[in-house]
Image: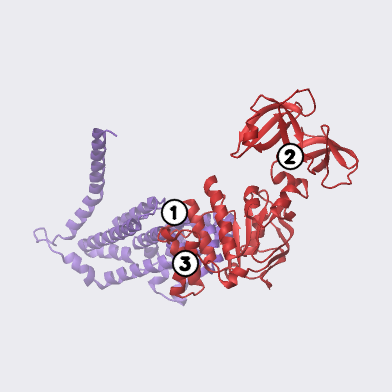
Amino acid sequence: MSRSRRRRLQLFRAIVFLVLGAFFLVPIGAMFEFSTRGNALTAPRNLDAWKNIVQTPDLTEAITASLELAAITCIAMLVLLLPTMVWVRLRFPGLSRVIEFICLIPLTVPAIALVVGMVPIYRWIEINVTDSILILSFAYLILVLPYSYRALDAGLAAIDLKTLSEAARSLGAGWGTIMLRVVVPNMSSALLNASLLAVALVLGEFTFANLLFYENLQVAIAYVGLVSATTSVAVAVAALLFAFTLLLILSFVRSRSGTAPADPADIQIAQPLAASGAIIGRAR
Amino acid sequence: MTTGGTEATRSGVEVRLEDLRRKYATTTALDGLSLTISPGELVALLGPSGCGKTTALRLLAGLEEADSGRVIVGGKDLTNVPANRRNIGMVFQAYSLFPHMTARQNVEFGMQLHKVDVLERRERANEVLELVGLSAHAGKYAHQLSGGQQQRVALARALAIRPKVLLLDEPLSALDAKVRSRLRDEIRRVQLEVGITTLFVTHDQEEALAIADRVGVMQAGRLEQMGPPTEIYSRPATPFVAEFVGLTNRLRGTVRHGVVDVRGTEIPLVEPGVPDGPVTALVRPEAVSLASDGEMEEGPLVGTVIAVAFLGAMSRVTVDLGDTTVLAQMPTSTASQHPAGTKVRLALRPDPVLIQREEPAPVS
């Protein structure tokens, strides 16, 4: 490659980076700027909105609930999906199409339709079992299935599951040992991807919670926005930063492991993050 | 000096497969296979793909279940014991090292599961890694090792748990030719040193004949013939074995009074007592010799060399006899006297041959 061409390429990269960076950072910067405005036109800048986040009990409760929901959904998804997918791959490869189809259904059904279908069940649970918001994690589990399935599927495709598990069995490993000591360590980046997708989706979820009358983070942001626009924007910025931090942690973990090849699941991260951004935006 | 085996493994145990049957949806993989492997013996199962040899090995490993029949190792019936409790070491065709572990961790994995304490584990890992000549690479990951090295680590890993039986499922087929023959000899050396009863599955007849104490040739889920390599090669029991083990010329002839007349040469039969009539005789390339001196009268065994394939010490010469072609194998120095285009006279050594009844409509 000639020198001038390389320089042009570098310039092109820098421009793309700047444009994309501006695309993401300008709105966030503007949101941050807005969240620090005083109440009156002439009022000095302050961090009252940010202080409100921790001083509004409804908001802190909703944040805690959303984080708990994210954790529960994420763990439930992994516990449900990973062994199932491993089992299907090893024992019933013919069923993998069916599993894939089932997991992708939530993607094709609009959230509003899903919720309408769930309302009677949730009414019943609320009256007869519990009214805890954490019960939403069942609905969220369905919501994250398509994304997490894709991420895990890519990870499983990257290892020779059959040979590795048979080798482990011949060495004396039971299925639990195979899952924890052979499968999981060899698809850590796929597991991280799947988890991140689940967390990002749950933190950005508004429709389900709102229509089922639960107050999660996004619903709370919407309500707070009616009272104090600056506080609601501050929370939105915080949620976005939280998602970005997760992404950074992910890429840090991956670059440290060093050997992980390009992962098709990476592409999919952008989607729910953008979705959660859109929902955050809508909640305002 | 390496000390790969302990008293327990050096003695080896007997393995018996009794009337194993296994059907898949459309095919019968094993159709009543019975096989006994003596303690410390290396038996190779040889056959074309789909003959059931891999299924037999997987049934012995416990990775698949038989429809009927029994697997007995060291006098114990293991038929219903799961794979992870059989204590049988296995090396796979595909690279099977755990990618997130170093060679040493791979070797120690099985011992951890068997609750071997740390010090003994270290020592044993050193021992088996030295046995396969990889002590210097103990800290490397699978992707830092060559294919041959990976299979050696896999062998060390399988031996580390002091298994009762060692199973080798085409462990060399992913390797290139040079590495393959070296590792093949090394597997045999290690097996003899440890003294472990071993079942080796391959479709490569050269591999099987080179390292096995006994070779079993399989076809369609059954054992066609079982015997020492020399017997399999020189006295094949069936035409299938003759054709599968080594190249064979198919020459037309006529049986008369217990011998077969092939183009004017009388050759004894492996199984006498065949009624007279037209047959196809299966003649080994090394039983065919060439002469190009003296007068070359036209005759049933005079033809033209059309190709010489150099195989190293040996060469294979293809001779066109007009109505058919014949392969002859000989030392390269002899073959060089008959370059392509030379007119030659063939001589068939009167080694006993197998025959097939002439089919109603011969293909060639």
Palette colour of chain B: red
Quarter of the image with the C terminus of chain B in it: top right
The picture places residue B125, in percent across and down from the top left corner, at 47, 67
Tell which subunit mark 3 falls on. B
Quadrant of res B45: bottom right
Chain assigned purple: A
Q: Is residue B20 left or right of residue A46?
A: right
> Comparing marks 2 and 1, which lies closer to the viewer?
2
Looking at the image, is mark 3 or mark 2 earlier in the sequence?
3
Same chain shared by disc 3 and disc 2: yes
Q: Is residue A243 left or right of residue B71?
A: left
On screen, B240 above or below A224? above
**Element under label 1?**
loop
Kindly check if marks 2 and 1 are in contact, taking CB atoms under 8 A apart as contact.
no
Q: Is residue B283 visible?
A: yes
Q: Which residue is mark 1?
A: B145
Tell which subunit mark 2 falls on. B
Mark 3 surroundings: few (<14), some (14-19) or many (≥20) residues within 10 A: many
